[in-house]
Image (cartoon, rainbow, N blue to C red):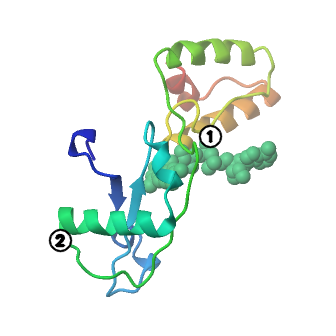
Amino acid sequence: MPRGEQRHLIAATWTSLKWPHRAPADQLLVRCYVGGVGREDLLQLEDEVLSATVKAELVALCNINVEPRYTEVNRWWKAMPQYTIGHLDRLTQLDAAVSRYPGLVLTGAAYRGVGIPDCIRDGAVAAERVVRDLLGTAPSHRERVATH
Ligand SMILES: Cc1cc2nc3c(=O)[nH]c(=O)nc-3n(C[C@H](O)[C@H](O)[C@H](O)COP(=O)(O)OP(=O)(O)OC[C@H]3O[C@@H](n4cnc5c(N)ncnc54)[C@H](O)[C@@H]3O)c2cc1C
């Protein structure tokens, strides 16, 4: 959701469309996100206030005007790494420092992408690198691509 919209909601996932097993077939499960960088104060609000705000915004945006059968509020403080300017330069320095220790690699959301597919891809490359370091074999195609 663009900041210009001036809403509390920053995104919503139609979870039961993405993963049908997460809700009964005749019901809709929506995961709504509030807060984010620069709006952390919203996480201080009471559960009831957050739920009411999200419900009101879903009415305004999507005309979903029914009382939910089930509501759950979870707070994820500082859950998402934020890449700032200079991130790639810092990564290069980190990689150079870590490469002095064969078998040691850095992987996860803090480095080369926060999405689950990014993390899986980077994890696979990291695992290959560890195996290669331990066995002394040549870099795989995937590793070579990942470092260029
Ligand atoms: C609320 C939320 C919703 C998201 N939704 C999506 C989405 O819909 N799609 C998407 O692609 N991405 C989504 N993301 C982003 C994505 O889920 C994360 O960026 C990704 O899962 C991070 O993977 P990771 O392996 O780096 O870290 P994690 O998945 O956090 O794994 C780290 C693991 O290390 C363990 N650990 C931590 N400390 C220690 C320790 N000292 N010793 C041993 N183990 C330890 C933890 O228990 C955890 O199991 C979402 C993130 C959040 C917070």
Residue with the mark numbered 1: 123
Q: Within 10 Å of the Cα at label 2, are there few (<14), some (14-19), or many (20+) other Cα atoms?
A: few
* Discs 2, 1 touching: Cβ within 8 Å: no
Residue plotted at (57% across, 42% down): 78
What is the distance, in whole Å, between disc 2 and disc 1 at their CAs?
41 Å
Q: In this view, does 1 lie to the left or right of 130?
A: left
The amino acid type of the residue labelled 1 equals Gly
Q: Is residue 23 above or below residue 85?
A: below
**Would you identify the image quadrant in which residue 70 lies?**
bottom left
Q: Within 10 Å of the Cα at label 1, are there few (<14), some (14-19), or many (20+) other Cα atoms?
A: some
Residue plotted at (49% across, 57% down): 45
SS class, disc 1: helix
Quick one: 26 or 96, which is closer to the camera? 26
Quick one: 23 or 133, which is closer to the camera? 23
The numbered disc on residue 5 is none
Determine whether the beta carbon of the residue marked 2 sits less than 8 angstroms from the nearest atom of ligand 1. Answer: no
Determine whether the beta carbon of the residue marked 1 sits less than 8 angstroms from the nearest atom of ligand 1. Answer: yes
Residue plotted at (55% across, 42% down): 119
Q: Is residue 110 left or right of residue 64?
A: right
Residue plotted at (32% across, 82% down): 67
Q: How many labels does the image show?
A: 2
SS class, disc 2: loop
Q: Is residue 63 left or right of residue 49?
A: left
**Quick one: label 2 or label 1, which is nearer the N terminus?**
2
Residue 120 pos. (x, y %): 56, 45
Residue 137 shows up from this direction: yes
The amino acid type of the residue labelled 2 equals Asn
The numbered disc on residue 63 is 2
Residue 65 pos. (x, y %): 23, 77
Residue 104 pos. (x, y %): 77, 27
